[in-house]
Each structure stands twice: as structure tokens, then as C-alpha cells.
Amino acid sequence: MGTDLENKGPCLGIRHLQAVLLFLAIAVNYIARLNVSVAVVAMTDAATSNPDFPEYDWSEAQKSYILSSFYWGYIVTQFPAGFLVRRYGAKLVLFIPTFATALLSCLTPVCISWGGWLAFSVLRLIIGLFQGLIFPCIHEHLAKWSPPKDRNRLGVFAYSGSDCGSVMAMAISGLIAESSLGWPGISYVSAGLCGIWCILWLLLAADNAPRSRLIGGDERDYIERSMRRNDGFHDQKIAIPWRAIWTSAPFYALLVVRSAQGWANSTMQLQTPAYMHGVLEMDIKSNALYSALPFLAMWCMSYVYLAIADLIMARKWLSLTTLRKSINTISYWGPAAALIGIGFLDKSQAGLAIALMAINAGLNAGSGIGNMLTIIDMSPNHSGILMAITNCATNIPPLLSPLLVGVIVTEPSSRTQWQIVFALTAIVFFIGNLVYIIWGTTDQQPWDAVDFLKPRDAEQQQQQQQQQQQLEQWKAKSKSEKEI
């Protein structure tokens, strides 16, 4: 029994509670982030929702500005988030954006009635600024609470909160818009969910195992024993090897593959309701429910991928690098083929279109195991910083793609125009995974070592001491010459 505990730790413990909290954090913030795609449809077509609330005559370009404005703010705070979470810990830094999202969601209906689409865009931009802090915190928290044996399981479960949030955002937003709450209720419900999570987080979260007042000694020892494989894991003052990171080919492979995922996510999450409303001619309620179906498939399939990955790793059929690349290939190239097929369907084939979108999303669920957790594999000591950089790159495409879709899709009911959008996404999927196959790796990088910069620092210190000695000698010589 003692040996089993030493090898595996408690079967269910506080590290799992932290993963649940992270799952809920992503879910509630995704609901607040993504409900805009359904809300915009309800605000501009009152006949498909509750007609008792105001309807706005916004152009396709203005809708695109609303959809993309979140990412203009979101991208700005990614990089600073990596430094903040290293300095103050995930508990404080993750609380701030979720609380701010709750507050700003409450203000959304009032701001729209006052300033229209422009005020809506500005508010979404501010929410994006706050939510840019979230994923570097998530990754840093996972790195501190996930022993290597539990990393896939805890990581996939936590990040599946994005699929849950996407499902909820799409499924309940249409129902709320049709209810007595109308489209303003979408924002109010989002605010309430974020507020509830903030209370749970303050009560139950801790930056790491030694700081948790809930954890037992056995589990704390198990986590700490596992983390000691990376000396100084909990040391938040480890120097960042910037030059080594920015000259690392595996790191650039991560940037490319994560950017491809960002493009695909923005296309599916933000444009699906518009495609279903325009090409498939679905009403707001059916639109929302069917828009949620692909994300439900993704949510379920993420656990299927996890079970397969656990089996393969337990039987040692593949190395970790080969496993991640294989799963990533399925989750990128499979959806690429499905997207091309979707572009050739019209309203008479709505059922097939929805099925292909569900297959597309279900296959893409493997991206978490395929590439996201690779960041922790490569560098557990700098996972927060690396996540900040890669997530910044990931969210450049969502910033641009709604604007590009607004240029391409001038007539929402045009199947030909949507074919171009889906074909571009398929190409991005293909190239992103190809780069990852060639240059990606899960090997822990040499520059992750705590003492990686110490030899260089010692050499610089020695040079500074020599320069100081030379300066003092020169001063002494000058003084003696003046005295003479």
C-alpha cells in the first residue's frame, strides 16, 4: 500500500480539485467570451428571439468589429500575464480577470443601449484585456500541481472547460434570447456564473501544494517529490533564458501549430452561428443548439483522446513525442478534410453539414494532448511565460479572421463565399501540423534548467570585476601622477 501511494499518490486529492476549479474557470469565461456570436444574431434579428427588446441595424462589417474586438484586447495582456503570474501567483491573477468579466458583463446591455455597436466593441475589447491573463495562469497552475504521471489527465480535464464553455455559450444563449430575459439576459447569466466561480476560487484554490491548507501530507509529499525532478520548480525567481527560447526550433513549431489552432477556433466559434443563419437558414433557437453540437462533440472526444493516450503510454507503444504528433495529425488534418466538405453543402443538406461540423470539432479535440501540454513537457519551469507567448501568437488569427470573413462574406447566404472561408481554414490546419511534425518535440529543453544562465552570469560577473579592478588601478595611477 505504501509503495502504491509513493508511486501514484492519492487517487483523488486536492490536485484534482485544482483541475476542477481550472475547468470551471475556463468554462465560465468562455461563456462570457463566446455568447457574443449568438447575441449579435439576436440583437440584429429580433424576429428570431424575443421581439420585446431593441433591434439594431448593424452592417456585416460592424458585426465583424464586434466579434474581433475582444481579441484586440486579449492579445495585448498575454505577455504581461506571464510575468504577473510568476510574481504574484495564479490565485490572485486568475481571480482578477474573472471578477472583471462578471462586472463588465453586467454593464453590457446598458452600454449597448447608450453607444450601440461602437460601445459594444469597446466593452468587448476591455473584457479581452482582462481575459488575456487567464491562460498563462492556467498553464502555470497546472505546471505546479500536475506530477508528470497525472499531467495528461489533469491537463486535458482542465482545458476541456473550453469545450464545456463553448457548448454552454451556444446552447443556452439562444434559449435565453428567446426567453423573457431577452438578449440582455445572456450577459446577466454570464456575469452570475463568473461571480459564483470567484467565490469558489477564493475558498478552495492555492498557488501550489505547500501553500494549500486543504491538502494532506501524503499528497503534498507525492507532488513535491515528483516536482523535485525539476530543481527549483517552485522558485519564482528563475532567470528566463530569452535568447535560448527565441532561437529554439521546437518553440517556433509550437508557435505555428498554436496559431493554426487559433485560426480554426475563431472560425468555428465566432462564425458558425452566422453560417447556420445565412446558408442553412436556421432560426436563433435551432441555430444556437446546433452551433453547440460541434463543441459538445469536442468535449466528449477530448476524454476519448485522453483514454487512448493513457492506454498507449501505459503500454509504452509510442514515445511521448510520437504520441502527441500522431494525435495532433488526426486532430488537424481530419478537420481540414471535413471543412472542405462543409463548403459544398447548402440548406437542403443541413443535416449533413451539421454532422460534418460535429465530426470536425470532435476530431480537433485532440489538440490539447497533441500540442498544448507540450509546453509543460518542454519547460515546466517557464510554462507560464511560454504559454503567454504562444497564446499571444494563437490569438493573432482570431483578431484578424473575423475581419477577413467580413471582407469575404459580403452576403451571408452565399455558399460560395463560405467555401473560401472554410478552404482557407483547412489550409491553415494542414500547414500548422506539418511544421509541428517536422520540428516539434516533447523533450525537456536544456534551457529549462534552473542553472542554465548561471555560467554566463558568472562569466559576466568576473568580467565586471576585472573591469572594476582596471578602473581602480587607472584612478590610482592618475592620482599618483597628479601628486608628482
Image (spheres, grey):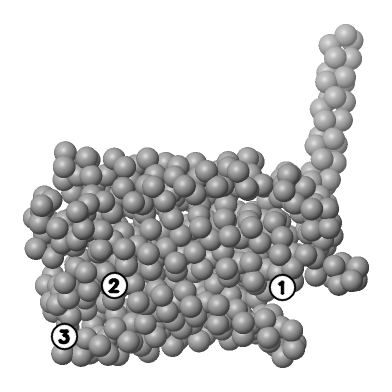
Secondary structure, mark 3, is: helix
Q: Which residue carries the number 2 mark? A: 289
Indicate which disc, 2 or 3, sits on the residue closer to the N terminus.
Answer: 2
Secondary structure category for the residue under label 1: loop
What residue is pinned by disc 1?
Answer: 443
Q: Residues within 10 Å of mark 1 (few under 14, many from 20)?
A: few
Q: Position of residue 187 (x, y in %)?
A: 30, 50
Residue 483 falls left or right of residue 40: right
Q: Are marks 2 and 1 in contact (CB under 8 Å)?
A: no
Q: Nearer the viewer, mark 2 or mark 3?
A: 2
- Residue in the foreground of this view, choosing between 324 and 97: 97
Q: Which residue is mark 3?
A: 347
Whether 322 is drawn above or below 392: the answer is below
Which quadrant holds residue 248? Answer: bottom right
Q: Looking at the picture, tell me which residue is in the foreground, 368 or 41.
A: 41
Tell me the number on the disc at residue 318. none
The answer to whether the residues at label 3 and label 1 have Cβ atoms under 8 Å apart is no
Q: Nearer the viewer, residue 295 or 477?
A: 295
Callout in the foreground (2, 1): 2
Q: At 56% across and 81% down in the image, what residue appears?
A: 305
The N terminus, quarter of image: bottom right
Vertical placement of residue 239 versus 222, above or below: above
Residue at 89 percent across and 14 percent down: it is: 480
Residue most extreme to the front: 180
Q: Is residue 88 above or below residue 395?
A: above
Q: Is residue 417 left or right of residue 221?
A: left
Mark 2–mark 1 distance (CA, rounded to whole Å):
41 Å
Q: Amino acid at mark 2?
A: Leu
Residue 203 shows in the view: yes
